[in-house]
Image: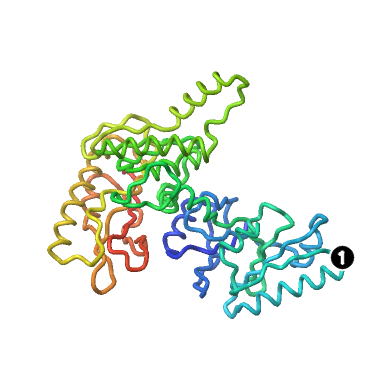
């Protein structure tokens, strides 16, 4: 299946995620950077944008001309949007294509509403709030790429991400705010996993990785050294199963039976325990590990060299200690994806932990050994996340 993807603001990470999710079916056709973001064309098996944290829009190539495609839609009003990610695209080129299609369709008796372009590419919010997500066949967004046309089949649900992030009952800004998008990416970078696989997060905090694992159909297993974080994770995971994932749904007609079944199902889907990641003995099975490791102290300005060395030593001790503890408890081939800290320097680069050789000597293969491009950070963010992808040898 031929896809076009508009990638997030850190395309190298988005690309790595897509490759991991698509697996052996992935084949790159072309990739380039436009003023509207990175554009990726590739072949892959069927994908769902709901599980892709780094993809903004996902579209499939259409074999028909756009007009023929629209004429084949069921009767009723059509909502039409056109984005143009060709190299010379402008707002005008996209708007002209949309109005041209509308004019012909109206002439043939169809009712059409065109979504106005402010730029060559409709924004995620515009596409989402106009229903151009591919779920309604009479609400269509086309993406034009030179002479080829694609229909959008998925738009990143920024509202759902905001709810999962901001409406959770237990939040703590002091321990860092792991974005749900990044949590999805960390899990996806583990590669293809069986349905119901058990995902371990040994630094679970408020449970963001665990909640995303549940929503993706996996079982969630978390530990944390802080009793407060264990309590927060349990509260958040109970909330997510009840409010979002419908994992607790049951067909029983008895309210009492339904409550017992719901409690049993929730308990079987997630488990959170108190434990130090450098010494804890986890229960089996562990099918994959996805986590944000200890990132050190929050910082609002570039640290001095002395402060940097102190932070690096502390963070390295905890992460290396965790990986040493883990390696004897997982099977050969088990994926481990960890976000380690990286610190902003005055020249705009990031200083990573120097731990790759030690990790390999412990018994792991490092999939992204060069680690170029897998720094996850906002512009100017002082403590970034350095994504390291491992598998036990």
Q: Position of residue 156 (x, y in %)?
A: 54, 56
Asked if 391 appears above or below 369 in the picture, the reply is: above
Q: Is residue 66 above or below residue 173?
A: below
Residue 203 horizontal/vertical position (percent): 30, 43
Residue 257 appears at what percent x and percent y?
Answer: 55, 19
Residue 24, visible in the rendered structure: no
Q: Residue at x 14, y 57 (%)?
A: 310
User: Considering the image in quadrants, where does the C terminus appear?
Assistant: top left
| Residue nearer the viewer, 61 or 228 | 228
Q: Nearer the viewer, residue 339 or 95?
A: 95
Q: Is residue 73 left or right of residue 250?
A: right
Q: Quadrant of residue 356?
A: bottom left
Residue 29 image-quadrant placement:
bottom right
Task: Name the residue furthest left.
Answer: 306
Q: Quadrant of the N terminus?
A: bottom right
Determine the residue located farthest toward the right in the rendered image: 108
Q: Is residue 201 left or right of residue 323?
A: right
């Amino acid at each position: 299946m031929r896809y076009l993807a508009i990638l997030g603001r850190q395309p190298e990470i988005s690309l790595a995620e897509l490759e991991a999710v698509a697996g052996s079916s992935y084949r790159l056709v072309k990739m380039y950077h436009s003023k509207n973001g990175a554009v990726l064309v590739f072949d892959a098996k069927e994908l769902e944008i709901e599980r892709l944290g780094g993809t903004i829009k996902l579209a499939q190539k259409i074999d028909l001309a756009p007009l023929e495609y629209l004429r084949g839609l069921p009767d009723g009003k059509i909502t039409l949007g056109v984005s143009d990610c060709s190299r010379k695209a402008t707002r005008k080129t996209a708007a002209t294509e949309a109005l041209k299609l509308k004019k012909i369709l109206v002439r043939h008796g169809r009712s059409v509403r065109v979504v106005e372009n402010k730029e060559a590419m409709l924004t995620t919010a515009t596409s989402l709030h106009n229903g151009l997500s591919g779920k309604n066949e009479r609400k269509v967004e086309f993406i034009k790429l030179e002479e080829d046309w694609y229909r959008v089949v998925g738009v990143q649900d920024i509202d759902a991400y905001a709810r999962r992030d901001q409406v959770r009952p237990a939040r703590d800004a002091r321990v860092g705010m792991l974005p749900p998008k990044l949590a999805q990416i960390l899990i996806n970078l583990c590669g293809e996993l069986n349905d119901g696989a058990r995902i371990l997060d040994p630094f679970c905090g408020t449970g963001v990785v665990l909640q995303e694992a549940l929503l993706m159909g996996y079982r969630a297993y978390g530990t944390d050294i802080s009793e407060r974080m264990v309590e927060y994770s349990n509260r958040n995971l109970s909330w997510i199963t009840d409010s979002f994932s419908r994992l607790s749904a049951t067909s029983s007609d008895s309210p009492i039976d339904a409550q017992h079944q719901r409690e049993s199902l929730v308990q079987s889907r997630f488990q959170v325990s108190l434990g130090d990641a450098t010494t804890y003995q986890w229960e089996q099975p562990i099918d994959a590990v996805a986590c944000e490791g200890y990132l050190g102290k929050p910082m609002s300005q570039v640290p001095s060299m002395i402060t940097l060395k102190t932070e690096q030593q502390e963070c390295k001790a905890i992460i290396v200690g965790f990986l040493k503890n883990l390696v004897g408890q997982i099977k050969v081939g088990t994926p481990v994806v960890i976000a380690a800290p990286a610190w902003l320097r005055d020249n705009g680069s990031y200083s990573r932990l120097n731990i790759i050789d030690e990790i390999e000597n412990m018994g792991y293969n490092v999939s992204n050994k060069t680690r170029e491009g897998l720094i996850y950070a906002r512009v100017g963010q002082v403590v970034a996340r350095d994504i390291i992808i491992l598998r036990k040898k």
